[in-house]
Image (cartoon, rainbow, N blue to C red):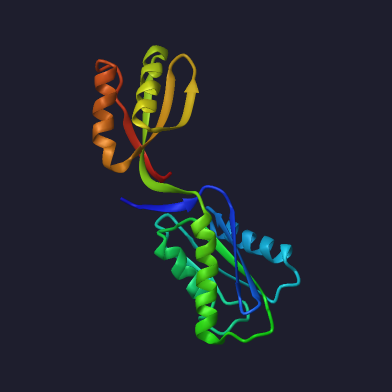
């Protein structure tokens, strides 16, 4: 099953290394476009800073990886930030580390440690939620049975991701992939066979 963690809300961290300030910003994003927008926002918020280094992980399988050293020596900033994100099991995420230079050169090893520690400072403060690959189950039911299905979904922790209430009701539920067969059987059971769900899609939730 595809699963990873992502921050519930944007979070900031900060470390001080040899008078250089490293300000980290961790944000959950859905796409490369959103990640680049978050990087631009951090740059705009700190126009006097010398470097705005970043890394992000996006994609349906958390397989799109990008790093940017933004003027630091190659491999000393973006890659260490990415390493911190991957070590924490994160996906759908961008981390920007803004550096205010303190006048003391840190060397390549010192820079790499500082950028990784700055990213980790934000990760450690983050409230993380799990993102899992889910099956989307569509259910057509009478109003009475729709209420039974909704109650079963709440009890099992399934997500309701859509509902159309007309003469009959169409519900769309997000169910962890590993629970798909059990969920379909449970819907039949709780409605005495009147409702049968159909798997229509997969998505990350």
Name the residue: 54% across, 73% down: 115
For the point 72% across and 66% down, the residue is: 46
Q: Is residue 10 above or below residue 25?
A: above
Image quadrant in which the C terminus is located: top left
Whole-percent x, y for residue 52 in the image: 64, 71
Residue 55 visible (yes or no): no
How far across and down, in percent of the image, does residue 2 sit?
Answer: 34, 52
In the image, 102 versus 78, the foreground residue is 102
Q: Is residue 199 above or below residue 95?
A: above
Judge left or right: residue 174 versus residue 15. left
Q: Residue at x 36, y 17 (%)?
A: 148
The residue at the point 52 percent across, 47 percent down is: 8
Q: Is residue 45 visible?
A: yes
Relative to 150, residue 99 above or below: below
User: Which quarter of the picture shows residue 37?
Assistant: bottom right
Is 131 placed left or right of 107 in the picture? Answer: left
Percent position (x, y) of residue 132? 38, 47
Residue 190 occupies quadrant: top left
User: Looking at the image, which residue sits at the far right?
Assistant: 48
Question: Quadrant of the rendered structure where residue 69 is?
Answer: bottom right
Could you say which is closer to the camera, residue 56 or residue 76?
76
The image shows a total of numbered marks equal to 0
Residue 7 position in % (x across, y down): 51, 51
Q: Nearer the viewer, residue 43 or 141?
A: 43
């Amino acid at each position: 099953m595809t699963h990873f963690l992502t921050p519930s809300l944007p979070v900031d961290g900060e470390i001080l290394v040899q008078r250089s300030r490293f300000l980290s910003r961790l944000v959950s994003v859905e796409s490369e476009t959103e990640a680049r927008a978050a990087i631009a926002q951090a740059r705009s918020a700190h126009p006097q800073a010398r470097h705005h280094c970043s890394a992000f992980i996006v994609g349906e399988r958390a397989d799109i990886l990008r790093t940017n050293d933004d003027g630091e020596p190659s491999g000393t900033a973006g890659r260490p930030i990415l390493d911190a994100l991957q070590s924490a099991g994160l996906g759908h995420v961008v981390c920007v580390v803004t550096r205010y230079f303190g006048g003391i050169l840190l060397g390549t090893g010192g820079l790499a440690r500082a950028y990784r520690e700055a990213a980790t400072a934000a990760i450690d403060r983050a409230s993380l939620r799990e993102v899992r690959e889910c099956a989307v189950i569509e259910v057509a039911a009478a109003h009475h049975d729709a209420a039974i299905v909704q109650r079963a979904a709440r009890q099992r922790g399934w997500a309701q991701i859509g509902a159309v209430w007309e003469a009959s009701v169409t519900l769309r539920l997000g169910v962890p992939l590993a629970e798909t067969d059990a969920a379909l059987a449970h819907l039949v059971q709780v409605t005495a066979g009147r409702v049968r769900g159909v798997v229509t899609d997969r998505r990350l939730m």
